[in-house]
Amino acid sequence: MSLIIRLPHSHASVHAEPMETNSLAPGLYIVATPIGNLGDMTRRAIDVLGAVSVIACEDTRVTGKLLSHLGIRKPMRRYDDHADASARDGLLELMRSEPVALVSDAGTPLISDPGYRLVRAARAEGIAVTSLPGPSAVITALTLAGLPTDRFMFAGFLPAKEKARADTLAELAAVPATLVFYDTGPRLADTLDAMAVHLPGREIAVARELTKLFEECRSGSAADLADHYRSHPPKGEIVVLAGPPQAPEAPDEDTVETALREALTRLPPSQAAKEVARAFGLDRKDLYARALSLP
């Protein structure tokens, strides 16, 4: 048996009815679940959850509520960050002969959630792995923020400690892409304060309550957003995005010549050209020719 979903017109509950279908082949099925609006549960996801033998999940209480809402009763096994090798081995043994689903508490499994070791082990043993696309807070936030999406980097949660957070942002500052992070309400203002220091001049967006009734995506400078959320403490899960670094303005000719002349007082022409090229992002060969022509 599997299930057919009837999508609601609002955030109301999802109703499902049984449907005759062929049984699933053995293997691992990665199933995305809603991040807020239950209407985002796909028909295929419901069909698979209704047909597998076991559902591996982060928290059986959270997944149990979703299954109850969908009218599905299936055995669940907890598989989270604290799962040991024996838990993984037990799931691998089961999926050799039966279909097993992997879900997270919300969204697409493995995206800042446990599970990659299970997928890696299944692939290594030749067990079929099938991924069902669906809700993802990262992608949803990117589509709302209005920041460049041709290149982006998801970096999960920033460290909670100030120095580690600063070190991570400093490491990522030069990445020529939109940066995407997960965050929580109590830490958001501190995160934005750190971004103001280590990602200066970037456009920042904060997306929260995604797919829910009070969905919000607020953009601005890190400092302004920090002030706002310090005055209006948010709740729930949050996505913070930082636009890519801006290309530096091209230096004027006088500035380049002054730097080149200064470098030539310390270095031979080839080394002086190399130093100035690195400092201003200019062509080293052109600068070398210019150094040789200076009186």
Image (cartoon, rainbow, N blue to C red):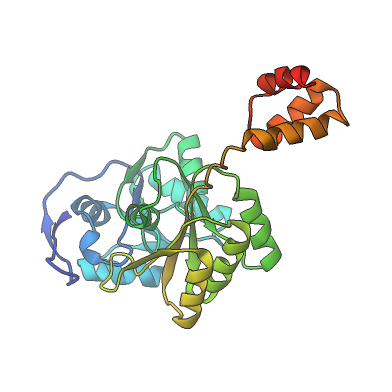
Which residue is located at x 15 percent, y 69 percent?
10
Looking at this view, is 133 or 91 the one in front?
133
Residue 252 vs residue 176, the one in the foreground: 252
- Classify residue 183 as left or right of residue 213: right
Residue 154 percent coordinates (x, y): 49, 50
Whether 49 is drawn above or below 235: the answer is above
Q: Is any part of residue 213 visible from this angle? A: yes
Q: Is residue 202 left or right of residue 271?
A: left
Residue sitting at the far right: 266
Picture layout, residue 256 above or below residue 3: above
Picture coordinates of residue 177 (x, y %)?
49, 44
**In terms of image quadrants, where is residue 200?**
bottom right
Which residue is at a point 17% across and 44% down the rendered structure image? 22
x 28%, y 41%: residue:
25
Q: Split into 4 quadrants, where in the image is the N terminus?
A: bottom left
The residue at 19%/70% (across/down) is: 11
Location of residue 189 with respect to 168 vertically, above or below: below
Question: Horizontal and vertical percent for residue 79?
Answer: 47, 59
Q: In the orientation shown, which residue stands out farthest toward the front?
A: 295
